[in-house]
Amino acid sequence: MLKPLFLALALYPIPALANTLTGADDPQFQTLVTRLLAADDPAAVKGLYDLAAQGNIAALVLLPLAEGWVPAQGSFTEKKKLRQIDGQRIEDLAAKSDPVAALWQGGTSKSDLPGVIARALDLYRQSEPRKADTLLSAASLQDPNMALPSGFADLPADPRMLASMLEYRMNLGDGSVLPTLQNWLDSDRIEGWIVMAILANPDVTSNAKALAAEIKLPPDAAAWIADGVRIVDLGKQNSPPVPAETVSVVMTNLMPRPLFAPVRAYCEARCPTSAAACEAAFVTLLGVPHLSLDQATPLHDTMSEAEFFASPRGEQVLVGQALIAWSHRLGGAGYSGPLQDNHAFQTASTVNACFAAGALRASVPLPAAP
């Protein structure tokens, strides 16, 4: 069942693009970035280090990530030297130079719980919703019993995460979340229907069952909850391909959300004449972007999402990393052999040949710089 789209973004506005950091338009910086987006180039990483040492803020903020893409070469002493400038860690210097980097901190969640939540909420406001999701998810894992943060109902977050956090509060018997759930359902938001799908599980607590009984459902709720079930099933370890009915639900309810912005950017750049079919093929084969995506992507104030995901490295990060996780999961079921011989890949190929060609490219590591 296709639903009218209701985006939380409309209720929780964030800037369309983050401000560009000083030095991002430096031709030398752009040249180094171009090299890093195309190949594993240690010399380009060293070039970024030199620019950062000269005061280029964009190079400084991108440098820790670039060193993750292409680990430093040489002895331990040489590697350690490239992790510092004037005796200070490059991550610390980046945080002092860029408020967004200070909030992200490379995704670390080792600070106090309120601090992690505050950083996440600020990252939503700074046009970094997926990185914010990473921190908010980490906070909820640290303390599943934590109260839902301010503005929770309208965060531009992964709907599956929002639904899981709210459902957990219902299992604890927290009736204060019922107005949020009722509003989601009344507004036909997929978050609400995911919650109802989870609550249909017989293992939910008596607290949750009692609270669910207070919810007012429309006459056609069963069809809507079925869509929620499909989204829940998307996260399970089912063998691909993703069923066409589930792909349709994802395309309507999840694809327009920040969660899938990398897929949209990638498909618009790589398959401009068949972008929607490319997006559907991605879902058919891989379901959702891999969780490691946000650890390997630049902050928006150093590089636009469109630029990154149009590049070979962006393809590797988005499709290649998801394929690695996909193949590991299938390996447990006895899968082996060339990607093009896999049934799920062949199914995705019929949805969009352009995406299939990209998946084959992403299955091969980036070349080393000449």
Image (tube, helix red, strand yellow):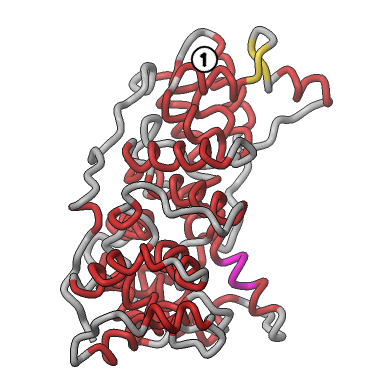
Q: Which stretch is magenta?
A: 323-327
Query: Is 271 on the left-hand or right-hand side of 58?
Result: left
Looking at the image, which is closer to me, 193 or 324?
Answer: 193
Residue 349 visible to an observer of this rendering: no
Between residue 344 and residue 341, name the one nearer to us: 344
Q: Nearer the viewer, residue 259 or 211?
A: 211
Q: Is residue 110 left or right of residue 191?
A: right
Identify the residue at horizontal 44%, vertical 87% (top origin): 200
| Residue 168: x %, y % from top left | 50, 68
Q: Secondary structure at mark 1?
A: helix
Q: Give coordinates of residue 298: x percent, y percent.
A: 46, 38
Residue 358 placement: quadrant: bottom left
Q: Is-magenta flag for residue 326?
A: yes
The quadrant the N terminus occupies is bottom left
Is residue 344 shown above or below 291? below
Which residue is label 1 attached to? 51
